[in-house]
Amino acid sequence: MNGTGLTGGDPALLRRLNVEAVLRVLRNAEPMTLTQIGRAASLSRQTVDVVIAELDEAGWIEEVAPERSIGRPARRYRFRAEAGHVLGIDVGVASARMVLADLDGTVLASRRTEIAPGLGGPGRTERMHDCAAAFLAEHPGARLRGLCLGVPAIVDAHGRIRLSTPLPEWSGTDLATIAGTWFGCPAHVENDANLAALAEHWRGAARNADDFIQLIAGKRSGAGMMLGGRLHRGRGGAAGEIGALAVLGWEGDAMNDVRAAPDPAQIFADAAAGDTTATARVDRFSRVLAQGIAAMVLTVNPDLVVIGGGLSQAGEALAGPVRSHLDKLCLDPPQVAASTLGTEAVALGAARLALEHLNVELFGMQISPGAGSSRQSGTPATGRPLNAGAFEPPMPPLPR
């Protein structure tokens, strides 16, 4: 153990590094004593005393009730996950889903909001801001430290929407910069299928798979992928856009026959019950979907395919036929599973990505397990201090 903590160089930098070392130890641990913290962080008791006092005063940690013991019990401290919050938003064509989570990723609240059709770019942006503000207003104790929006679009490395077919009014919009002015905290933007993959790897069907393909199957179809435990976005964020290959038919009659039906869930239910007409419709839908999946499977040879989106609620009634067709199309067919997170996956993945950035920015670390983002964390677009004036009372920043 380092007997005196980090020494030499810029004192402010060393102080910051000592703070990060203590937070890394406490971030995902049970309450610990000062001795345990010092041993785990390789810091002296004197250094730990100073850092703990600063973090306690700033509200990032707190002393917990002592365990029963003979004699004077040692003081124990825990990280306060409630010291900050993140907002994940899944932006759809006709609705938006939002989740509010603490720094441990525990979802505290969620909401689905309808979005009126026909909004222009600025109108949709304003509507999303208003929806988020109303949602946060219901939780006045929240201290928002980051937010992320998931969009059905190709998104570049800086959060600018390069192209969105479902939301053409947002094509070319620097949405990350705009959203960064909403609540005085960093904002991030990512493709919705990528965020669904992040969520499934974190808490869903892909927890034990580092190489998998994520499908969004609903009113539209999209795909993302995770390779080696990290999101694969490609050079310009367009990885997984297999639906753009028109010859596959993902925008054709076979797909629309099911996803544009008044009640797609009933079609899958009827097929599962043995109805021959419904079975034929589901089989045709699954075959066309599997053709696009197979193109990616044959390229990256993943362990798993996760079917998400609204139609994933059909479960094995959809996963089974897709699996059957992939077995015929692929040299080494992967497992196929329906999402365990359903329609909440994109919003949850957005919260997760906001947490990834926040952990790097505040604590010098990434939460684990899970995939990181290819983008670097940045300051709010307004240049204001993190979360300044957004909520009262404001949470003091980490010591620097």
Image (tube, rainbow, N blue to C red):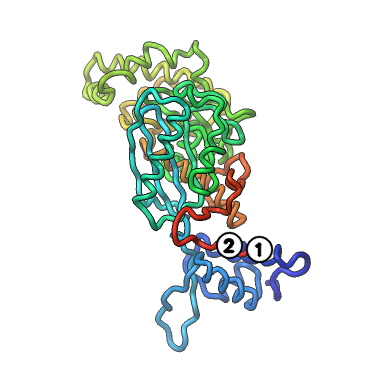
Q: Residue furthest bottom?
A: 71
Residue closest to the eye, 257 or 81: 81
**Farthest-out residue, right:** 9
Q: Secondary structure at mark 2?
A: loop
Tag 1–tag 2 contact (CB < 8 Å): yes
Quadrant, the N terminus: bottom right
Looking at the rendered structure, the kind of residue marked 1 is Arg
Q: Which residue corresponds to mark 1?
A: 16
Residue at 57% across, 44% down: 372
Q: Is residue 293 visible?
A: no
The picture places residue 101, in percent across and down from the top left corner, at 42, 51
Residue closest to the eye, 274 or 147: 147
- For label 1, the SS is helix
Spatial CA distance of label 1 from label 2 is 8 Å
The dot on residue 398 is: 2
Quadrant where the C terminus sits is: bottom right
Dot 2 crowding, Cα within 10 Å, few <14, some 14–19, many 20+: some
Is the residue 369 above or below the residue 271 in the image?
below
Q: Is residue 21 above or below residue 118?
A: below
Ranked by sequence position, the earlier of labels 1 and 2 is: 1
Q: Residue placed at 51% from the left, 32% from the top?
A: 191
x, y percent for residue 270:
22, 22
* Amino acid type, callout 2: Leu
Q: Which picture quadrant has residue 40?
A: bottom right
